[in-house]
Image (cartoon, rainbow, N blue to C red):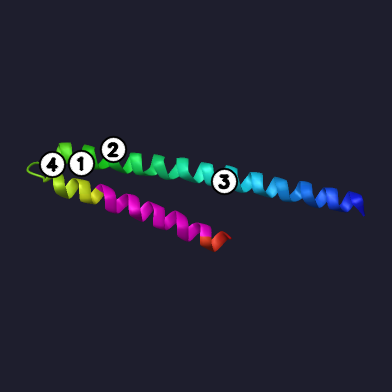
Amino acid sequence: MGEIKTLQISQEASIQSLQRTYKEHREVMIEQMCGNLNTYIDECDNNSVGSSGGNEQYLKEEMCRSVISIVNEFDNTTA
C-alpha cells in the first residue's frame, strides 16, 4: 500500500511539473507570435504610403488579443 501512495505522489508531482512547463512554453509561444505579428505589421506599414500610426498600434493589439484567444480556445478544447 505504501508503494502505491508513493507512486501516486510521484505521478502528481510529474503532472504538476508538466503543467508548469507547458504554461511557460505557452507564454513564450504567445510572445513569439505577437512579436512576429508586430514585425509583419511594421513591414507592411513601411511598404505602404500614408498609413496612420494609431491604426497600426490598434491592429497590433487586436492581433495579439486574437492570438491569446486562439491559444485559450485550444487549451479549452484539449483540457
Question: Which amino acid type is marked by label 3?
Answer: Tyr
- According to the image, label 2 marks what residue? 39
Q: Quadrant of residue 35?
A: top left
Check residue 44 in the rendering and tell me which mark sits there, or answer none. Answer: 1
Q: Alpha-carbon distance for marks 2 and 4?
A: 14 Å
**Image coordinates for residue 57, horizontal then vertical, percent:** 21, 46
Using residue 26 as the reference point, say whether residue 49 is left or right of it.
left
**Image coordinates for residue 20, horizontal then vertical, percent:** 59, 45
- The magenta stretch is 60-75
CB under 8 Å between discs 2 and 4? no
Question: Which amino acid type is marked by label 2?
Answer: Thr
Question: Which amino acid type is marked by label 1?
Answer: Cys
Does dot 2 land on a helix, a strand or a loop? helix
Q: In which quarter of the image is the N terminus?
A: bottom right
- According to the image, label 3 marks what residue? 22
Q: Which of 1 and 45 is in front in this view?
A: 1
Using residue 3 as the reference point, say whether residue 21 is left or right of it.
left
Q: Alpha-carbon distance for marks 1 and 4?
A: 6 Å
Q: Residue at x 13, y 41 (%)?
A: 48
Q: Which residue lies furthest to the right in this view?
A: 1
Comparing labels 1 and 3, the label whose residue is closer to the camera? 3
Question: Which amino acid type is marked by label 4?
Answer: Ser
Sequence-first tag of 2 and 3? 3
Q: Alpha-carbon distance for marks 3 and 4?
A: 39 Å
Q: Alpha-carbon distance for marks 2 and 1?
A: 9 Å
